[in-house]
Image (cartoon, rainbow, N blue to C red):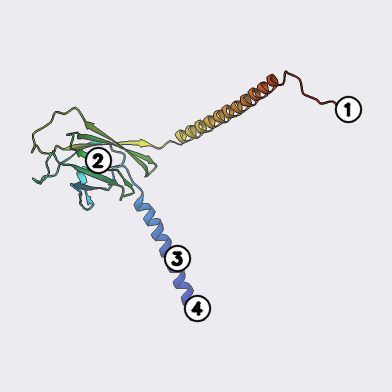
Amino acid sequence: FFGRRMTMTVRKDVLVVAFLCVVFAGCVSAYRSGDIVSTSKRSQFNDVFSDWSELQASLCPRYLYPKTVELPPPDSSQFYSNKLFKFALAFDDSRFVTSWFHINDNNMITLNSIDVTFVYRGDDIVDVRVVPDYDETQEKKKKYSKLKPVFLRYNWEEYSEQNLTIGTATLLILSSLFGSFLMLYVLATELLQMSATTKRTGGLPTTSKSND
């Protein structure tokens, strides 16, 4: 009897602890205004990939705080602007990973800045949009000119249910219009075929007489 009672008590304690852990984890994962959003960077130079590394706090975005930071270029002497160099970013514990950004390429096209828009809902980030700005009119530089820094512009946009509703309504309207157009097209095709058949038969149905 005591063994069963002790087992039930232990199980209740385990359930309570598990519940508290889940609640605590949910509270920890929720962002508050000004909290640092973890940001990582990975680089590639001449088919050599680096590991993901955390950016220092001053370069990371802060929740609901728009700001612009200057991402310094590699300080190693092996990185030159006439070599292919690119990097990728990851935000919010790697929940959102960007595609590769070319800092420069063989055509001397360089990256000036990246606009990063965080879409948030309440205390959570639901989407991240990035728009790079490239300089394609730059004159060809000398062979060993160094890479220049890239500006990261962090912006925040609140998620709107209205946008989702408008998008769904637009999709339904377009689907209805497409269906109506398809029905009209089929009907017009049938009418044209009937008209062509009537012209070939002289407008009267053909009948055959039987001999008595």
Q: Residue at x 41, y 63 (%)?
A: 18
Density class for disc 2 (Cα within 10 Å; few <14, some 14-19, many ≥20) is some
The kind of secondary structure element at disc 2 is strand
Q: Which residue is mark 1?
A: 211
Instruction: Give the Cα separation between the discs numbered 4 and 2.
Output: 62 Å
Give left or right: position of 110 versus 159. left
**Disc 1 and disc 4 in contact, CB within 8 angstroms:** no
Give left or right: position of 163 versus 73. right
Q: Earlier in the sequence, mark 1 or mark 2?
A: 2
The mark closer to the camera, 1 or 2, is 1
The mark closer to the camera, 3 or 2, is 2
Which sits in the foreground, 197 or 186?
Answer: 197
The kind of secondary structure element at disc 4 is helix
Label for residue 145? none
Q: Which residue is mark 3?
A: 15
Q: Which residue is mark 4?
A: 4
Kind of residue at disc 1: Asn
Q: Is residue 154 above or below residue 204?
A: below
Instruction: Give the Cα separation between the discs numbered 3 and 1.
Output: 97 Å
Density class for disc 1 (Cα within 10 Å; few <14, some 14-19, many ≥20) is few
Give left or right: position of 43 versus 205. left
The mark closer to the camera, 1 or 4, is 1
**Disc 4 and disc 2 in contact, CB within 8 angstroms:** no
The kind of secondary structure element at disc 1 is loop
Kind of residue at disc 4: Arg
